[in-house]
Image: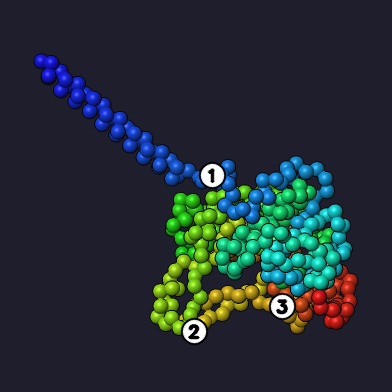
Amino acid sequence: MKKSAQVVAVRHVLWLGWKLVILLSLSLCLLALFRLHSPPNYYSSSSSTSPHLDVLRRRGAGSRFAGTPKLAFLFLARRNLPLDFLWGSFFENADAANFSIYIHSEPGFVFDASTTRSRFFYGRQLRNSIQVGWGESSMIEAERLLFAAALEDPANQRFVLLSDSCVPLYNFSYIYSYLMASSRSFVDSFLDAKEGRYNPQMFPVIPKERWRKGSQWIALVRKHAEVVVDDEVVFPAFKKFCKRRPPVDASKGKLNTKLQKQHNCIPDEHFVQTLLSLNELDTELERRTVTYTSWNQSATKMDTKGWHPVTFDYANASPRQIQAIKKINHLYYETEFRTEWCRANLSSVPCFLFARKFSRGAAMRLLSEGVVGRFDASSLLDSTP
């Protein structure tokens, strides 16, 4: 009798043990399912993915700034600023209290009297710049470094990202008023119809329905600049899974066909747009860029087509051409069948404040014809820093 009771007790314990195992397994499955369908935590308290972004921990509370707001000009340069003479004239007509300048150049490059024609750029380079490769995640990191540095100044309330070949289409007063009048960021953002750009390995950090594409040349309000800098989840996913396809190499023969089937993801054309969409900020954007680019399609012998920005030279930077750009008041996005009418603070406005890519000769013509201010461009012909 005693032995029978012991057997029953053992079976009871085993039964309870199995029930606990099953219950625990179900709980873990439910937790995994919940986390899979929950949005990622973009504001984790873990350490930054890049030591270069430690500066963000020390920035002030810019959203509560009550003084004169500044417009921060963020230049992403290969080395120097070849159009510094034009920008110098542009800033001469501005109140120094209304703007700030930050430049990401190659590591170690210093802007001083020997490297730039304009005093406005003296010492404005970042001290923590990195080596940047076109079409690589380092481009995003350089942009984030610029925004992080500018966020250190609480007076900076608007931020515009520019290349070293960008030119202003209006004077400072107009551009400042245009951007300050709007509570929205200007971010070219649209659905990406090309299946090859999105890498399924990004899921669940980046669901496909949140994948966006657009121009990297953006103008952000401070709140959105903070989102770009504070992100510690989306950027690592881009760094790992969003990579440029190897260029066509004739020496590889048929292997090119296989290589060209790889995901061809250009990080800077997707990162900010996708990040803001993941944070459900689409409704806080004017979904267009304020920087004009003229695109030209080319094809290689491998029948792979690509779009390349047209460079404006002296001949095609005429007043008529510039006026045509300034008259554009709407854009059409084929992938969304969407017409974007250009507005700022509910008012109809020209779409573009800046344009690229401009040669030195084209920039001289803009100056001599008074687009950004009175200046004698001929004085530059004999001065090369």
User: Does residue 107 sit above or below 69 in this rendering?
Assistant: below
Residue at horizontal 58 percent and vertical 77 percent from the top: 297
Q: Are marks 1 and 3 in contact (CB under 8 Å)?
A: no
User: Does residue 159 sit above or below 80 in this rendering?
Assistant: above
Q: Residue 15's mark?
A: none
Residue wearing tag 1: 41
Amino acid type indicated by mark 1? Asn
Residue at far top of view: 1
The quarter of the displayed image where residue 109 is located: bottom right
Q: Residue 301's mark?
A: 2
Q: Are marks 2 and 1 in contact (CB under 8 Å)?
A: no
Amino acid type indicated by mark 3? Phe
Residue wearing tag 3: 312
Q: Nearer the viewer, mark 1 or mark 3?
A: 1
Residue at horizontal 61 percent and vertical 63 percent from the top: 139
Residue at far front of view: 108
Residue at horizontal 51 percent and vertical 75 percent from the top: 247
Judged from the image, the secondary structure of the residue bearing numbered disc 2 is: loop
x then y, percent, for residue 12: 21, 24
Amino acid type indicated by mark 2? Lys
